[in-house]
Amino acid sequence: MTRRDIIKNSKVMLNVLLLILNLIAICSVNNAYANEEDPKIESLCKKSSVDPIALHNINDDYINNRFTTVKSIVSTTEKFLDFDLLFKSINWLDGISAEFKDLKVEFSSSAISKEFLGKTVDIYGVYYKAHCHGEHQVDTACTYGGVTPHENNKLSEPKNIGVAVYKDNVNVNTFIVTTDKKKVTAQELDIKVRTKLNNAYKLYDRMTSDVQKGYIKFHSHSEHKESFYYDLFYIKRNLPDQYLQIYNDNKTIDSSDYHIDVYLFT
């Protein structure tokens, strides 16, 4: 092999390596994309590349609402850190999770925390225990975001939000999710949609489901409001305290202005 051939092969290998690194970077960024067009299939994270432990854990989060907390008309002036809210002695899920006493809600910034400090709020989120740190010797569960103001945010009737499901670009299902809020967090709707999807298609079961990639697209009906999506298999590391951080921006939308499309790929 000549020196020229060696240099040529080295350049080819370098280009391949750069392409692989680029795909990894695309799949590793935060998976809520505001004002983005639909993603390219090749840029989506693939289930077969996700750690089995992560799949097991996230499957539990979106299968039967076991780790979903729904709280109405609560308030706190307590914090653990500057970017969270600490709800003391909260009534846990009608006693189902009575082992917990406090609920800590974490946000991506202190500004979001200050917005709700001392206000009457509603909470809808996925909670976790592992690596959740509260006050000393107080059993605490944590969640990211999921907070909306209670005052002047209730609808007189629940709002139905349509969801269309496409598998390999073929419409295979439609259903609705509901909310009683004018302004609702993306987390609340995402939980409701993913739970239905997971029950129907076993999204996070590597053995029985042929779904390998997918995303949930929140479509705005207004050109002045953003559309965005969540990659269903963007799972940061293995534990909920890591992969649930997608909700820490407490993203909130107008429930009357959106519909949802789900795209699954085998």
Image (cartoon, rainbow, N blue to C red):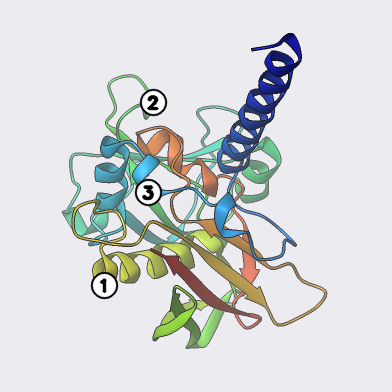
Q: Is residue 151 visible?
A: no
Q: In the image as oriented, which residue stretches furthest toward the bottom?
A: 157
Q: Is residue 217 left or right of residue 204?
A: right
Q: Are marks 3 and 2 in contact (CB under 8 Å)?
A: no
Question: Looking at the figure, which quarter contains the N terminus?
Answer: top right
Q: Are marks 1 and 3 in contact (CB under 8 Å)?
A: no
Q: Looking at the rendered structure, which numbered label has been put on residue 133?
A: 2
Q: Is residue 67 above or below residue 3?
A: below
Amino acid under label 1?
Ala
Secondary structure under badge 2?
loop
Give percent across and percent down for residue 183. 61, 71
Q: Is residue 227 left or right of residue 142?
A: right
Residue matched to label 3: 47
Task: Tell me how far mark 1 sits from mark 2, CA to CA.
Answer: 34 Å
Q: Quadrant of residue 186?
A: bottom right
* First in sequence: mark 1 vs mark 3: 3
Foreground disc of the pair 1, 3: 3
Q: Is residue 177 visible?
A: yes
* First in sequence: mark 3 vs mark 2: 3
Secondary structure under badge 3?
helix
Taking the spot 62% from the left edge, 42% from the top edge, the residue there is 26
Give percent across and percent down for residue 3. 73, 9
Q: Looking at the rendered structure, which numbered label has been put on residue 200?
A: 1
Taking the spot 70% from the left edge, 11% from the top edge, the residue there is 2
- Dot 1 surroundings within 10 Å: few (below 14), some, or many (20 or more)? few
Task: Tell me how far mark 1 sits from mark 3, CA to CA.
Answer: 17 Å
Task: Tell me how far mark 3 sits from mark 2, CA to CA.
Answer: 30 Å
Q: Looking at the rendered structure, which numbered label has been put on residue 254?
A: none
Q: In the image as oriented, which residue stretches furthest toward the right?
A: 224
Q: Is residue 256 above or below residue 47?
A: below
